[in-house]
Image (cartoon, coloured by chain):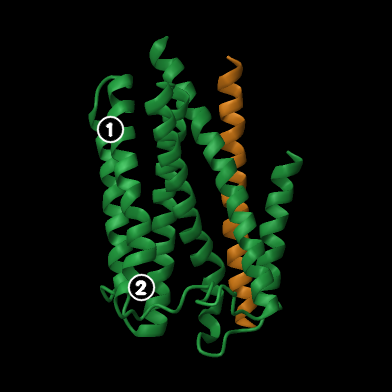
Chain colours: A green, B orange
């Protein structure tokens, strides 16, 4: 319980400092604040989908359904954070570029990631039998994750984009005001803690569902 | 009233509600695990 309360306070205090103390980026003005939600959500999309792929490989090697539980939970949460990043990005795009959706390379890429992982969940829902579902889903998840780094990191760099430069620039440095950087990194840590909590909770629910079906 | 306080209030309310909901779900999961 102590860890949970710490997580609550961590994110709440970061929100207070980010909204009341951190300066605004001159070009972004008031929309600077979207950064504290949008980038952590995008970061956790990649982390969760990567975790789903790792557990899918573990399942294919060991045939352990606990790994399949982790893979499915991570894919669900990855999709959830991806929706969060897409919606916050669309709101940001409306404020900065004048339209919610512009089919910018980064927007198009995230649209494909959403489609790929929605299809993953549809696939899981359509297969009868735990072993078969776990095996086919694991193969799909490994294949799907090959597209993720390409769509998120490569495609947006290959074409002209409206999207701002990555946080870590070409010289490997983070170009941010120290206070903004502190709030951003703090929110990144808080969101990662929230993800770890949700992931463990979802896995526990999957185990309960399996026990209920077996009974 | 500074609009930053309004945004902060809404953000804290949403985070608080989400946190309370996750705690409730976890309590329910713990209860089912004990059965």
Front residue of A151 and A18: A151
Tell me whether circle 2 and circle 1 mark residues in contact (CB < 8 Å). Answer: no
Secondary structure at numbered mark 2: helix
Examine the rendering and report whether any part of residue B1 can be seen: no
A9 versus A55 height, above or below: below
Looking at this view, name the residue that lies furthest to the top: A215
Give the mark toward the camera: 2 or 1: 2
Q: Residue A134 at x, y = what percent?
A: 33, 27
Asked if marks 2 and 1 fall on the same chain, the answer is yes
Chain holding disc 2: A
- The residue under label 2 is A157
The spot of residue A1 in percent (x, y) is 73, 38
Residue situated in front as seen by the camera: A92 or A164: A164
Q: Which of marks 2 and 1 is nearer the N terminus?
A: 1
Say few, some or many: other residues with alpha carbon within 10 Å of mark 1 (under 14 / 14 to 19 / 20 or more): few
Q: In which quarter of the image is residue A109?
A: bottom left
Which residue is tagged 1?
A: A125
Viewport quadrant of the N terminus of chain B: bottom right
Q: Disc 1 sits on a residue from what chain? A: A
Secondary structure, mark 1, is helix
Q: Which residue is drawn at 37% across and 27% down?
A: A60
């Amino acid at each position: 319980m102590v860890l949970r309360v710490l997580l609550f306070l961590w994110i709440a205090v970061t929100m207070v400092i980010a909204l009341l103390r951190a300066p605004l980026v001159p070009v972004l003005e008031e929309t600077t604040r979207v950064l504290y939600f949008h980038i952590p959500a995008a970061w956790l999309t990649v982390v969760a989908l990567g975790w789903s792929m790792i557990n899918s490989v573990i399942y294919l090697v060991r045939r352990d359904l606990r790994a399949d539980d982790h893979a499915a939970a991570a894919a669900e949460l990855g999709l959830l954070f991806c929706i969060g990043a897409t919606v916050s990005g669309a709101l940001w795009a409306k404020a900065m570029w004048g339209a919610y959706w512009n089919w910018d390379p980064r927007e198009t890429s995230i649209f494909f990631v959403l489609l790929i992982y929605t299809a993953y969940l549809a696939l899981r829902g359509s297969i009868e039998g735990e072993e078969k579902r776990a095996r086919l889903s694991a193969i799909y998840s490994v294949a799907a994750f090959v597209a993720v780094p390409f769509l998120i990191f490569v495609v947006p760099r290959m074409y002209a984009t409206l999207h701002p430069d990555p946080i870590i620039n070409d010289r490997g440095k983070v170009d941010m005001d120290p206070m903004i950087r502190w709030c951003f990194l703090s929110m990144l840590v808080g969101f990662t803690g929230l993800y770890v909590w949700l992931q463990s909770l979802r896995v526990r629910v999957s185990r309960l569902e399996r026990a209920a079906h077996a009974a | 009233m500074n609009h930053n306080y309004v945004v902060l209030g809404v953000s804290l309310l949403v985070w608080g509600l989400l946190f309370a909901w996750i705690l409730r779900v976890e309590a329910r999961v713990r209860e089912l695990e004990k059965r």
